[in-house]
Image (cartoon, grey):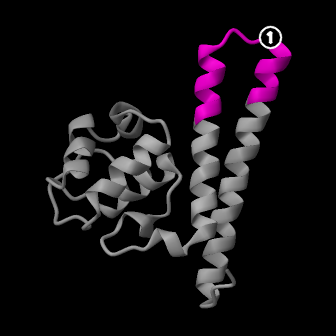
């Protein structure tokens, strides 16, 4: 993942969408940033005070389960149902992970929660792959 580097122009994003994506995925600033960028930088992106590089935007998209296009200014996520399904599946997987960590589950329950979480993440990845294929073909079949 990206490490902090010299400043560049960055990519213009919709700051509200960055925050919305993080919150809907149930992630803190630190969980999005991890050791790749600072929490402050993610906060500044959400406030419109900084622009992420493409690499950092890809990291944010991956961790929040949103497509890159969703973050860019002028993107219209309402018209992209496959991408929305992928984002919802990723958010549900994140919620399950938190449930498993907060609840005293039996071993079979914990294993079932983990299987369900992995399945949801795979479903989100499948939705993104289908959307990428459709977009690459230049035809929207939705």
Looking at the picture, tell me which residue is in the foreground, 1 or 126.
126
Quarter of the image where one finds residue 105? top right
Give residue 56's position: percent from left, percent from top: 34, 54
Q: Report the residue at 35% width, 31% height from top.
A: 30
Quarter of the image where one finds residue 131? bottom right
Quarter of the image where one finds residue 84? bottom right
Give residue 49's position: percent from left, percent from top: 14, 53
Q: How many marks?
A: 1
Give residue 100's position: percent from left, percent from top: 66, 21
Which residue in the structure is indicated by mark 1?
Answer: 106
Q: Report the residue at 58% width, 36% height from top.
A: 94
- What are the residue bounds of the magenta stretch? 95-113
Residue located farthest toward the front when viewing the structure as drawn? 78
Looking at the picture, tell me which residue is in the foreground, 123 or 55.
123
Q: Report the residue at 59% width, 82% height from top.
A: 135
Give residue 107's position: percent from left, percent from top: 81, 13
Asked whether residue 49 is drawn in magenta, I would say no
- Horizontal relation, residue 15 to residue 138: left or right: left
Q: Residues within 10 Å of mark 1 (few under 14, many from 20)?
A: few
Q: Report the residue at 49% width, 63% height from top.
A: 67
- Horizontal relation, residue 53 to residue 94: left or right: left
């Amino acid at each position: 993942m990206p490490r902090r580097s010299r400043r560049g122009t960055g990519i213009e994003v919709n700051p509200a969408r960055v925050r919305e994506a993080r919150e809907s995925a149930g992630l803190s600033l630190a969980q999005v940033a991890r050791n790749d960028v600072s929490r402050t930088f993610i906060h500044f992106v959400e406030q419109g005070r900084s622009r992420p590089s493409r690499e950092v935007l890809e990291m944010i998209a991956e961790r929040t389960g949103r497509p890159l296009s969703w973050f860019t200014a002028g993107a219209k996520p309402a018209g992209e149902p496959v991408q929305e399904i992928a984002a919802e599946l990723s958010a549900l997987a994140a919620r399950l992970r938190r449930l498993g960590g907060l609840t005293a589950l039996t071993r079979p329950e914990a294993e079932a929660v983990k299987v369900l979480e992995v399945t949801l993440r795979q479903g989100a990845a499948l939705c993104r792959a289908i959307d990428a294929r459709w977009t690459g073909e230049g035809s929207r079949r939705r």
